[in-house]
């Protein structure tokens, strides 16, 4: 499989000079991704594309080829695979659709393609795949024009669109990917194969999967159980309901099983099942950047009572505990906080806006053996923005103050945040995950992650959801 | 209450020249918000603040005063309220904290404040309020330096922090507010009073509330039931769990009731109860911009099968139906779509990326009497971004193509989107809510709302969640 994900050379069969064809778009993506190997466009009707020599047939390619991608019409794919076999190409990604997902006619073509591959010992991705991505060789052989961030997350997806959107979200939020495959109709290689490969891949630390269906008798669950002992496998299951199942049947042709049966089988296999698309990426972010908590006990620190309440509710609703503070800890906090602080967990700083007491409270919480994780509300940028009505007129003193306040906000917004820097250090010294929550754009949260290695979300509920999955995984590991 | 929310003149008692004091920050916010009335800073120790004359005492203010805000220490508040009474001020917002939320001592002070107000017939907001906002008079008398967007949403909040964060999110996402009050400890005016006022306020079309507790014997539920007949009231309840209830008790001193009892009582009162902070704002956006669906039947249109599956799952899990398409409709779609389209709802355009077929499919769905709402996946910007590795080197033809493609992306990103413009029109002609879903930043979704009046979210699950609440409200109205 290394030659699939890290090929030294790629043939693009069906390469095209027409910017509306996938054979053009994929070639452009490979080239602008700065692919580290050699790419051979193949098309009998073109001399060159994008300045690169085009080969009339696979047989004309001068060097060895590790991987071929096919984007031609469906009816010629089986023949082209024969040609790939003659050339000794070990892996073929069939991007072409119009196979079993479209009905009996397509299913027949798909069988022919598979037979052709089997004859030559070729392993197939797809058909109906949106391509693959590999960070190590800069291989961006995927359909939409995008460029994922690099990181320790690898993903297989039974929906190309869902997969590439995760890559796009990841790029927006700083969640980096190592490898990605859109598994398409899985005529040959299936998610079980990708799971196994990601499991032994040292560059992959977290595995994501979007799954619509599993073949009856598939090795998926026993394989997943083995792999979950080594790495977290986070699954988003499409087709959990009748409506979703019907849609999945017409999409990938997969049969949906009962949601309850799936959920319980997944849990036994140690798989972490998320319920929303956003949760899939949120979990990838937490798992790939933070240590696991040792248990389910959460310390909450907040600048405002209401957010503490909301976070405590979300914790309890998700099986996380919010333990009371022992007397010794109360006394420590008493020395730091205004006398009317909450004297309980959540630790409510009651509008204390200075940096230092917040950081000192965090340190006390992080050192305390009574909790396994911290949610730090209002860590990060303290003020959202500092706008004012452009129509304001007033005394010079007012106008000067507005200008100075706006500048001060700008400076604060650009300055590395002392609390977030403190969190980065405390995560490393305490070994506990400390998740920050603050208002801010995707780009802001991305910058926190990239510059300070701090996992942060814009709502406490998203922080709790990620923490809950980390605790679920810890519990699975402890049960082994 | 009009003189509270739309005062012609405001006295700020405890105005300060010290930028770290709330008496300074609130004054600055009022001034930079371009408040339409007169503001009188009151402080015996200052001649002027921000270039505005400062009055030694309330009694020295030359004109009549509709509203006083107090930010002084707690122990002098009762006396100051006496002075407000002598001046004939009808409403006082007590921003000062350190009252009943801090224990018996504070509770005693709070009773004195209340008695003082009662003696003079003054109505009190707070104490421990973060202030009020009113769009009509540009009154930004709230603590954090922010500037909410204007719109038809009014909100009361038993947590100042939660409330102002909703205003900040609203400003980021284009959800506009008409009035806001942080109700604080509710010594006098309670959320029931604000609810009644928002109910008869013609500028308010949607009411939001963050609620931690209701006094035993409160009129809240019967009042809410009356008001829900006229306007949607969307409630986020803090203190649903033991952990959250304990936090709420130490925050606002409110007793949390059982989550199940609350949920069922709220439903009977027609209140729409959301489960997360994000959902509160998402619902405000949908309710204030779109017509209600007539029922729970949803048409889904998608560019990729997986997202259709995910959306159908979310619909069914939230009590929304995804009806099958009748033969007549299938034939209409057959004429527009590639032969391998899904032939079912979700209508999967299978990577048809042109504008026109998408729009025509939307029109067919909108006209169909078999559905009450549409979720339009992948409407909006079709391509997330068009980046490329800066290290790319290659033939001139490649480099030129990359440059041209990048420019084309920029142009597309800046151009008003034909599909979104079509959705705006279809919502108005069909009377059905059509919610768009597309990847993009908060700023992007805000621009869609502001320029095209189209409600859009970055995930289908958020679209479904908002639609479900619209359907819940429709069902309540139909049950009357």
Image (cartoon, coloured by chain):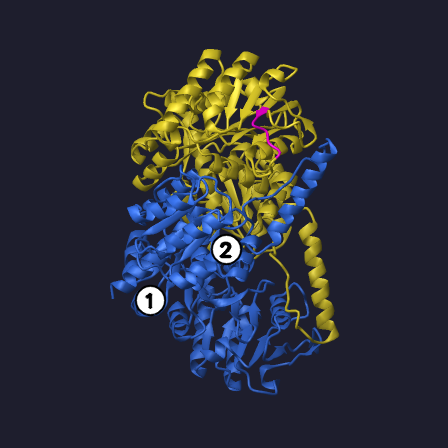
Chain colours: A yellow, B blue
Q: Is residue A218 above or below residue B352?
A: above
Mark 1 burial class by Cα count in 10 Å: few <14, some 14-19, many 20+: many
Residue drawn at (40%, 36%) of the image: B340
> Disc 2 marks which residue?
B420
Residue drawn at (41%, 74%) of the image: B197
- In magenta segment, residue A16: yes
Extent of the magenta region = A12-17
Q: Position of residue B200 (x, y in %)?
A: 39, 75
Label tally: 2
Say which element carries label 1. helix
Q: Nearer the viewer, residue A169 or A185?
A: A185
Say which element carries label 2. helix
What's the chain of the residue with tag 1?
A: B
Q: Position of residue B360 (x, y in %)?
A: 43, 52
CA gap, disc 1 and disc 2: 31 Å
- In magenta segment, residue B12: no
SS assignment for the magenta stretch, majority: loop
Q: Is residue B3 above or below residue A185?
A: below
Q: Is residue B22 visible?
A: yes
Residue drawn at (55%, 86%) of the image: B64
* Marker disc for residue B228: 1
Q: Position of residue A387 (x, y in %)?
A: 64, 63
Question: Marks 1 and 2: same chain?
Answer: yes
């Amino acid at each position: 499989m290394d030659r699939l994900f890290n090929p030294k050379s790629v043939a693009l069969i069906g390469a095209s000079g027409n910017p509306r064809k996938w054979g053009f778009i994929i070639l452009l993506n490979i080239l602008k991704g700065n692919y580290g190997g050699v790419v051979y466009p193949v098309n009998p009707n073109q001399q060159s594309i994008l300045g690169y020599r085009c080969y009339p047939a696979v047989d004309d390619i001068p060097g060895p080829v590790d991987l071929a991608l096919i984007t031609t019409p469906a009816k010629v794919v089986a023949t082209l695979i024969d040609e790939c076999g003659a050339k000794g190409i070990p892996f073929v990604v069939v991007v072409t659709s119009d196979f079993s997902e479209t009905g009996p006619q397509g299913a027949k073509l798909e069988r022919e393609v598979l037979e052709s591959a089997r004859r030559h010992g070729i392993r197939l991705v797809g058909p109906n795949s949106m391509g693959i991505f590999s960070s190590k060789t800069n291989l961006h052989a995927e359909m939409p024009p995008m460029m994922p961030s690099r990181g320790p997350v690898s993903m297989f997806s039974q929906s190309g669109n869902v997969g590439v959107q995760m890559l796009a979200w990841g790029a927006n939020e700083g969640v980096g990917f190592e490898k990605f495959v859109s598994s398409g109709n899985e005529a040959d290689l299936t998610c079980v194969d990708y799971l196994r490969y990601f499991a032994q891949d040292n560059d992959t630390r977290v595995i994501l999967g979007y799954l619509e269906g599993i073949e009856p008798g598939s090795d998926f669950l026993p394989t997943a159980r083995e792999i979950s002992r080594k790495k977290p496998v986070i699954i988003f299951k499409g087709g959990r309901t009748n409506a979703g199942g019907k849609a999945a049947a017409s999409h990938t042709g997969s049969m949906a099983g009962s949601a309850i049966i799936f959920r319980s089988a997944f849990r036994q296999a140690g798989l972490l099942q998320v319920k929303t698309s956003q949760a899939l990426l949120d979990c990838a972010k937490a798992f790939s950047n933070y240590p696991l908590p040792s248990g389910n006990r959460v310390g909450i620190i907040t600048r405002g009572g209401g957010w503490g309440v909301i976070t405590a509710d979300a914790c309890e609703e998700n099986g996380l505990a919010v333990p009371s503070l022992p007397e010794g800890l109360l006394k420590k906090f008493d020395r730091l906080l205004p006398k009317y602080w909450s004297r309980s967990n959540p630790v409510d700083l009651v509008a204390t806006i200075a940096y230092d007491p917040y950081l000192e409270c965090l340190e006390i919480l992080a050192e305390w053996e009574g909790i396994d994780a911290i949610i730090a509300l209002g860590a990060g940028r303290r003020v959202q923005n500092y706008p004012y009505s452009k129509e304001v007129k007033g005394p010079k003193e007012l106008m000067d103050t507005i200008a100075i306040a706006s500048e001060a906000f700008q400076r604060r917004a650009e300055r590395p945040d002392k609390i977030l820097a403190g969190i980065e250090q405390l995560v490393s010294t305490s070994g506990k995950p400390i998740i920050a929550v603050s208002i801010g754009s995707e780009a802001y949260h991305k910058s926190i992650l990239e510059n300070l290695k701090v996992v942060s979300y814009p709502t406490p509920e998203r922080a709790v959801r990620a923490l809950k999955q980390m605790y679920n995984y810890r519990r699975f590991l402890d049960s082994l």
